[in-house]
Every structure is written in C-alpha cells, then in structure tokens.
Amino acid sequence: MTRDEFQNLKRGDIVRHVMDAQSYVVTETCRNRVTAVRTIELTNPVEWLLVVKDGKRIDDNLDGG
C-alpha cells in the first residue's frame, strides 16, 4: 500500500500485513496512525461470558458463574 492509500483508509476498510493472512477492520484513523481490530465468529453460547453490556460492566460473569 502506498503512503497515500494508507492515509486515506476509512472505517470499515479491511487490511492485512504483507507477511500474515490475518485481516483487520479499520475502526479509526488519525494522521499517520490507524486503529484496526480483528474479529472472530462466535458460536456455542455456553462457551462465552458477557463482560460489558451497554457500557456497564457485568461483574457476576467475571468469576465464571
């Protein structure tokens, strides 16, 4: 990617490092920095804990029960 392409990244663009197959979704850009996150597909609800809901921490789930 060129410097111009990098500086024109927008939220929702998907990028990956040239040496890795994992992709990332751009969430924020600020001059010469880009914030991107990696997402996964969740299945099997019993294997997951809700930690924060609507910006509020769900303390009961942090101890596993």
Image (cartoon, grey):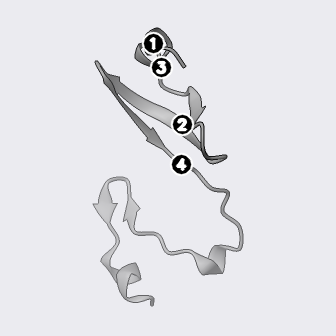
Q: Nearer the viewer, mark 1 or mark 3?
A: 1
User: Which image quadrant is residue 65 in?
Assistant: bottom left
Residue drawn at (54%, 37%) of the image: 25
Q: CA distance from mark 4 to mark 3?
A: 16 Å
The x and y percentages for residue 56 are 30, 60
Q: Residue 56: which numbered mark, if any?
A: none
Query: Mark 1 Cα within 10 Å, few/some/many (few <14, many 20+)?
Result: few
Q: Amino acid at mark 3?
A: Lys
Is mark 4 in CB contact (under 8 Å) with mark 2? yes
Query: Mark 3 Cα within 10 Å, few/some/many (few <14, many 20+)?
Result: some
Q: In the rendered image, which residue does mark 1 sit on?
A: 8
Q: Nearer the viewer, residue 20 or 23?
A: 20
For residue 17, side relative to residue 36 (left or right)? right
Q: Earlier in the sequence, mark 1 or mark 4?
A: 1
Q: Earlier in the sequence, mark 2 or mark 3?
A: 3
The x and y percentages for residue 42 are 66, 62
Query: Mark 4 Cα within 10 Å, few/some/many (few <14, many 20+)?
Result: few
For residue 15, side relative to residue 10 (left or right)? right
Residue drawn at (37%, 63%) of the image: 52
Q: Earlier in the sequence, mark 1 or mark 2?
A: 1
Q: Residue 10: which numbered mark, if any?
A: 3
Q: Residue 38: which numbered mark, if any?
A: 4
Q: In the rendered image, which residue does mark 2 sit on?
A: 25
Query: At numbered mark 3, what does the secondary structure look like: helix, strand or loop?
Result: loop
Using the image, determine if residue 46 lies above or below residue 36: below
Q: CA distance from mark 4 to mark 2?
A: 6 Å
Query: At numbered mark 4, what does the secondary structure look like: helix, strand or loop?
Result: loop
Q: Amino acid at mark 1?
A: Asn
Q: Earlier in the sequence, mark 4 or mark 3?
A: 3
Q: Amino acid at mark 2?
A: Val
Q: Nearer the viewer, residue 48 or 6?
A: 6
